Image (tube, rainbow, N blue to C red):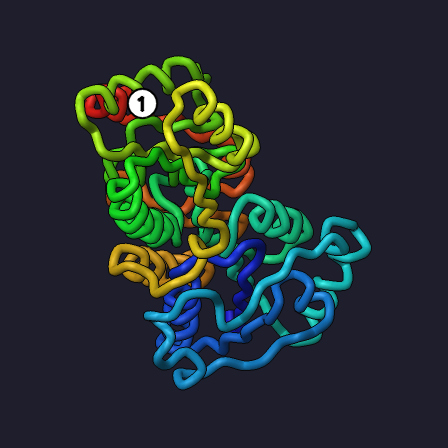
Amino acid sequence: MRTIGVLTSGGDAPGMNAAIRAVVRTGIYHNVKVMGIENGYNGLINGDIKEMDLSSVGDIIHKGGTILKTARCEEFRTEEGRKKGINVLNVFGIEGLVVIGGDGSFQGAQKLSQEGIKTIGIPGTIDNDLGYTDYTIGFDTAMNTVLDSISKIRDTSASHGRANIIEVMGRHCGDIALYSGLAGGAESIIIPEQNYNIDEICRKLIKGKSRGKLHSIIMLAEGIGNAFEFGNEIGEKTGIDTRVTVLGHTQRGGSPTAFDRILASKMGAKAVEVLLNGKSGRAVGIKDNKLFAMDIDEVISTKKEFDEEMYELTKILSI
């Protein structure tokens, strides 16, 4: 294999640049030309491709976002759109493709693999919603971004005796809310994987206030519902001044943590090595701190297992 391509697709995640850097430099180390494809599958269809060298990925390991930029592409979901992409790969002599992204990005890689294109996926998504791997690139950074916000919100909430609902990303997976809520000492964590009782949450708030608690933090994953309606209901039921903070896309930005930089570097290098060993239709993951490459069909079909023990621990520690 003499030429490989790399693209980032779907939502951006801190650490993507570190993964791009690892793919490019590992490829060059093995005397392989690396082509950077801009704007995801949309850029593949349109031929937004350039050769990358050592300087292309210099001074990017600490930067958030993705230097290759990213976009969602409805056209690539069609057979005609994928044929356009395959033709472009052939024109540029790209024999293998590394796709960095989440579930939707992996589905695109799966389709290309079925068409005979050698593809390897790297999990880059802040939601940590891919069940085959313990961690995805960007999750640790997003969690720490949320944790920093919790600390700041706690300061002002304590000054005013308020309850504060913090809405975080996680439409179908509550890991950001769960992990940051545990680390941030939240009183209640409301996530898609678990049913909740609003009266139970209100009782906990009232009991806390009666024993002199100055503030309360409630973590809410965005997939649950309208945070402001939820806040109004809690305020009406408890009489406690309740405010809502929606963190939004601040969770996607910022310099990646050391954990994400290392994870992305390992996964990027592993992806190139798998390609050069002649394997395709795989995705790189990590389990018990060990890297592996799994068949992408199995990756996509693997359901995310919810961490019941961690959830129960948050309830125990928030009494």
Name the residue furthest bottom: 55
The three-letter amino acid code for the residue at tag 1 is Leu
- Quarter where residue 319 is shown: top left
User: Is residue 112 among what the camera can see?
Assistant: yes
Circle 1 residue:
205
Residue located 53% across and 58% down the image: 99
* Snapshot quadrant of residue 30: bottom left
Q: Is residue 245 above or below residue 87?
A: above
Q: Nearer the viewer, residue 149 or 52?
A: 149
How dense is the environment of label 1, judged by Cα within 10 Å: few (below 14), some, or many (20 and up)? Answer: many
Of residues 4 and 73, the one nearer the viewer is 73
Of residues 137 and 273, the one drawn nearer to the viewer in this rendering: 137
Q: Position of residue 178 (x, y in %)?
A: 34, 33
Q: Position of residue 307 (x, y in %)?
A: 33, 26
Image: 21 above or below 86: below
Residue farthest to the right, as pictured: 80
Query: Which residue is drawn at the image coordinates 62% and 67% (left, top)?
Result: 39
Q: Position of residue 221 (x, y in %)?
A: 46, 35
Asked which secondary structure carries label 1, the reply is helix
Residue 178 appearing in the image = no
Residue 248 horizontal/vertical position (percent): 49, 50
Q: Residue at x 77, y 57 (%)?
A: 81
Residue 295 higher or lower than 209, as above or below? below
Residue at image point 41% right, 34% down: 242
Q: Is residue 203 left or right of residue 47?
A: left
